[in-house]
Image (cartoon, rainbow, N blue to C red):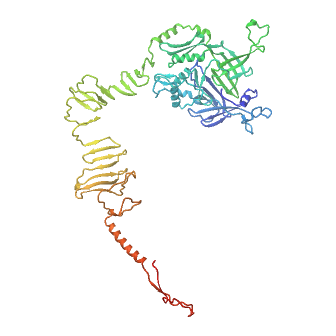
């Protein structure tokens, strides 16, 4: 059951309820001014009884008054709300923190009713009628697995959901120990989802929020919604209470092979087909469903949009009689004094219709006990059943073999690793989806793709190699080999003598020989490669087919060179030498000699000459005075001169005469000893 607020639940119970509807179609919102009416049909069973392991798309039929037609596969999401325009403070008996009602009034929250996609349409007068289905309809595509088998059912489920872009909620609970032993062949994604759900006592459906969900059936599950007698218009019990104590699962429909668990007659046996079930799975299924029961009925009720198919519901029904009409024994009567009896059932099929108001139709069908016990086949049915047992059916797999009108006889492994096709136009063996051995009908030739390994025997006549690899020993008695001979492994015995080889390819792992003479040697046909030829010498190419390095064989003036080219093909520089110069030249517009590590510097041995300006951008270490020719004697001479100048400077003195200084008074005797002559001190 979809969760709703207390306000929404309370207003659904009111008799003066007023619905608001809208629909989001391809991202654009449409109100009830456009929506005339709609109905949503949900099912968990396609038969007249209870089933598990179904994945049935829900159906939306909506009438819209539109000027323009909706595009193909348009996405439609209907919503419903309840008007709160009459809500007063006295009536608002709801928890304050749970209320999200705007002060301006309006309605309750918008409840989604599902996600659907347009399938077909018709126009009646000025109203478009669209028939839509939910996303499960997109699962009707072939399931081709990329998993390695055996694989868990959970891994298969996740692979399917990832491929289809489905998201699922926590209701999807898959037993982690359940496995599928071999890759499924001939099943759709929707079938596989149903098989996985059935093994886990569930069916698959799309919830109102657009997520994939499981409806898991468990014996004794409590009701999630209770209907009073005022909530429905009429209810009709169609059969006695249906219960199950025994499980019978058919895992091979052709031979009628089954697994069973539990005890009980046909009326209490749940029959189910699933090719991936094991006895352990059936035992677990019976333990989960043992005693599962429901009341078969049909009901027309007021609309409760939160109910989902598979929900267990209870309802009250008045069954009281007057004393005069009570014809049953007193000790057998189980009627309460109020006359109201409570029943429990589940929703296997429901239709929610909106046309101004909301109406709900609920069904829980079952097969009667007489149908279960006394199923009598007529003469035609008996003949058809006998034909089904003995006839080979078109498109039906028999241990990997199928017969169809388009392909004839096809034999294929379950994991698609190998396949053989036999018909009047094709005789082919496939490996991994590609032809490995086939008959080329127009050319009257058998062709191999891959490896041809000789276990024994002798090839005589002419062997033409179309493609492939020969391994082992190939001994030629006679004949001529033409085409491509590719040797991966093995030993050639005897003498292999080529009188003349014209054209064709020789492919091998190792070629041993003294001399190989040819015009061009390539490591690849194009792209990144090395080429050797007599004209252009040794060349390397990048992935863009640009020649980056070339070792030429030119002999002009005795030159030999290694030339370098940029990514655009332009000349970048070369390393060459001339016999007349007797030296190695490195030539380019700019030359960088560098080391990737300071621990491994660049070494220059021998005399080095720089004929141009030298610029040093960092410090120099390891050069002493003795390493530079003549520098030591020059520095010694400069030091001697500096010492002489220093000695002369620091030992220099001179005389100074300051004359008579008596301040104009001859009585003052001034400098009597030396008459005003003084000698200065050294610096």
Residue 519 shown left or right of residue 58 in the figure: left
Q: Position of residue 434 (x, y in %)?
A: 38, 28
Q: Position of residue 126 (x, y in %)?
A: 64, 32
Q: Residue furthest bottom?
A: 666
Q: In this rendering, is residue 608 above or below 525?
A: below
As rendered, which of 481 and 130 lies closer to the eye? Answer: 481
Quadrant hosting residue 81? top right
Tally the marks: 0
**Residue at point 50%, 25% (across, down):** 152
Q: In this rendering, is residue 240 above or below 597?
A: above
Residue 280 visible in image: yes
Q: Position of residue 69 (x, y in %)?
A: 59, 34
As rendered, which of 195 and 331 lies closer to the eye? Answer: 331
Residue 611 shown left or right of residue 336 in the figure: left
Residue 477 shown left or right of residue 603 in the figure: left
- In the picture, the quarter occupied by the N terminus is top right
As rendered, which of 158 and 392 lies closer to the eye? Answer: 158
Q: Residue furthest front?
A: 673
Quadrant hosting residue 137? top right
Residue 659 shown left or right of residue 514 in the figure: right
Residue 126 visible in image: no
Q: Position of residue 3 (x, y in %)?
A: 67, 29
């Amino acid at each position: 059951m979809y969760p709703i607020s207390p306000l929404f639940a309370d207003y659904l119970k009111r008799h003066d309820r007023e619905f608001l509807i809208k629909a989001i179609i391809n991202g654009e919102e449409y109100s009830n001014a456009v929506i005339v009416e709609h109905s949503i049909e949900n099912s968990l069973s396609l038969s007249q009884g209870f089933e598990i392991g179904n994945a049935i798309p829900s159906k939306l039929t909506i009438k819209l008054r539109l000027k323009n037609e909706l595009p193909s596969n348009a996405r439609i999401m209907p919503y419903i709300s309840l008007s709160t325009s009459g809500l007063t403070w006295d009536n608002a008996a709801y928890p304050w923190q749970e209320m999200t009602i705007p002060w301006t009034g309006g309605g309750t929250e918008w409840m989604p009713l599902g996600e659907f996609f347009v399938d077909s349409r018709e126009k009646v007068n000025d109203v478009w009628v669209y028939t839509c289905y939910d996303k499960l309809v997109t699962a009707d595509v072939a399931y081709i697995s990329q998993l390695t088998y055996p694989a868990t059912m959970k891994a298969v489920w996740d692979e399917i959901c990832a491929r289809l872009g489905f998201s699922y909620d926590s209701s999807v609970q898959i037993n982690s120990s359940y496995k599928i032993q071999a890759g499924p062949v001939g099943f759709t994604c929707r079938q596989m989802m149903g098989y996985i759900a059935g093994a886990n006592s569930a069916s698959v459906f799309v919830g109102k929020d657009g997520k994939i969900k499981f409806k898991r059936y468990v014996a004794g599950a409590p009701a999630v919604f209770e209907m009073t007698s005022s909530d429905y218009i009429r209810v009709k019990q169609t059969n006695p209470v249906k219960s199950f104590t025994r499980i019978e699962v058919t895992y091979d429909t052709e031979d009628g092979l089954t697994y069973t668990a539990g005890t009980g007659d046909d009326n209490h046996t749940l029959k189910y087909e699933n090719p991936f079930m094991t006895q352990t799975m059936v035992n677990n299924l019976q333990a989960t469903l043992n005693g599962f029961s429901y009341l078969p009925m049909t009901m027309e009720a007021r609309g409760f949009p939160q109910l989902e198919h598979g929900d267990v519901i209870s309802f009250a029904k008045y069954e009281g009689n007057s004393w005069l009409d009570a014809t049953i024994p007193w000790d057998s009567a189980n009627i309460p004094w109020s006359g109201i009896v409570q029943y429990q059932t589940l929703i296997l099929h429901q239709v929610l219709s909106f046309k101004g108001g909301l109406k709900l139709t609920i069904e829980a069908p079952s097969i009667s006990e007489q149908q279960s016990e006394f199923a009598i086949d007529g003469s035609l049915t008996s003949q058809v059943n006998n034909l089904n047992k003995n006839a080979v059916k078109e498109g039906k797999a028999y241990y990997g073999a199928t017969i169809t009108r388009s392909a004839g006889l096809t034999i294929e492994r379950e994991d698609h690793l190998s396949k053989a096709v036999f018909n009047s136009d094709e005789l082919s063996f496939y490996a991994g989806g590609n032809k490995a051995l086939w008959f080329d009908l127009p050319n009257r030739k058998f062709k191999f793709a891959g490896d041809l390994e000789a276990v024994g025997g002798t090839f005589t006549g002419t062997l033409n190699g179309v493609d492939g690899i020969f391994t082992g020993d190939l001994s030629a008695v006679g004949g001529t080999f033409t085409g491509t001979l590719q040797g991966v492994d093995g030993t050639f015995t005897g003498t292999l003598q080529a009188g003349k080889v014209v054209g064709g390819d020789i492919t091998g792992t190792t070629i041993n020989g003294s001399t190989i003479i040819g015009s061009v040697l390539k490591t690849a046909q194009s792209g990144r490669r090395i080429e050797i030829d007599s004209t252009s010498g040794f060349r390397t190419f990048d992935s863009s087919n640009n020649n980056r390095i070339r070792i030429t064989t030119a002999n002009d003036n005795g030159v030999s060179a290694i030339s370098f080219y940029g990514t655009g093909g332009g000349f970048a520089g070369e390393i060459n030498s001339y016999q007349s110069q007797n030296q190695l030249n490195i030539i380019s517009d700019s030359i960088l000699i560098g080391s990737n590590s300071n621990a491994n510097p660049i070494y220059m041995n021998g005399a080095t000459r720089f004929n141009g300006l030298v610029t040093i951008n960092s410090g120099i270490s390891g050069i002493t005075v003795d390493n530079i020719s003549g520098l030591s004697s020059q520095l010694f001479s400069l030091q001697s001169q500096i010492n002489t100048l220093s000695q002369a400077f620091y030992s220099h003195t001179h005389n100074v005469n300051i004359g008579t200084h008596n301040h104009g008074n001859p009585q003052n005797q001034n400098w009597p000893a030396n008459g005003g002559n003084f000698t200065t001190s050294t610096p």
